[in-house]
Image (spheres, helix red, strand yellow):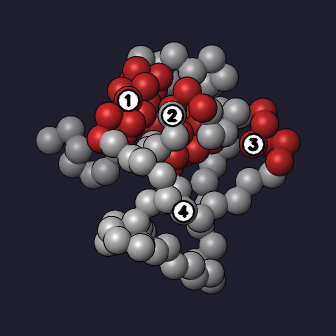
Amino acid sequence: MSLLGACWMMDREKYWELNILDEAHGSWGQMGTEIGAKVWLSGGKLICDRRTWFAHMFRTQGGDFGFPYKQSGRQVENARKYSKELWLGNKWPKAIHDINWLVEKFNPTGWND
């Protein structure tokens, strides 16, 4: 349903059509949610090639292996707030499906129980 923002590919035309990495999300957070929601809600799909492998080293150790720029929890919270309003409020104008469709598509057995 979604993806890790560290590794993904998309056709250039689709990237621009869907406005992927919308700067309104800010500089931090929600990349996987944004890409997943935009692709599914516009009538596309995410696929995974299980014959591949990648690694992602996250810079949380500090010192000389920290972020190369200032990062605050406020940026993360702003991205989450924008994302919630956009997707849960069904406010993305290019959607052909609403968020309920997406939830039902991936509805796990027993979800409603």
Q: CA distance from mark 4 to mark 2?
A: 16 Å
Q: Earlier in the sequence, mark 3 or mark 4?
A: 4
**Numbered circles on residues, count:** 4
Q: Percent x, y for residue 113?
A: 14, 41
User: Which callout, 3 or 2, points to the residue nearer the camera?
Assistant: 2
Q: Which residue is mark 1?
A: 78
Left or right relative to 29: residue 38? right
Q: CA distance from mark 2 to mark 1?
A: 7 Å
Mark 1 lies on a secondary structure that is: helix
Local crowd size for mark 3, using a 10 Å CA cut-off: few (<14), some (14–19), many (≥20):
some
Mark 3 lies on a secondary structure that is: helix
Instruction: Say the numbered circle drawn on residue 26.
Output: 2
User: Mark 1 and mark 2 in contact (Cβ < 8 Å)?
Assistant: yes
Local crowd size for mark 2, using a 10 Å CA cut-off: few (<14), some (14–19), many (≥20):
some
Q: CA distance from mark 3 to mark 4?
A: 16 Å
Q: Earlier in the sequence, mark 3 or mark 2?
A: 3
Q: Report whether residue 43 is seen.
A: no
Instruction: Say the numbered circle drawn on residue 15.
Output: 3
Q: Residue at x 54, y 62 (%)?
A: 6
Q: Which residue is mark 4?
A: 6
Q: Residue at x 44, y 60 (%)?
A: 67
Q: Amino acid at mark 3?
A: Tyr
Q: Earlier in the sequence, mark 4 or mark 2?
A: 4
* 42 to 56, vertically: above or below: above
Q: Amino acid at mark 2?
A: Gly
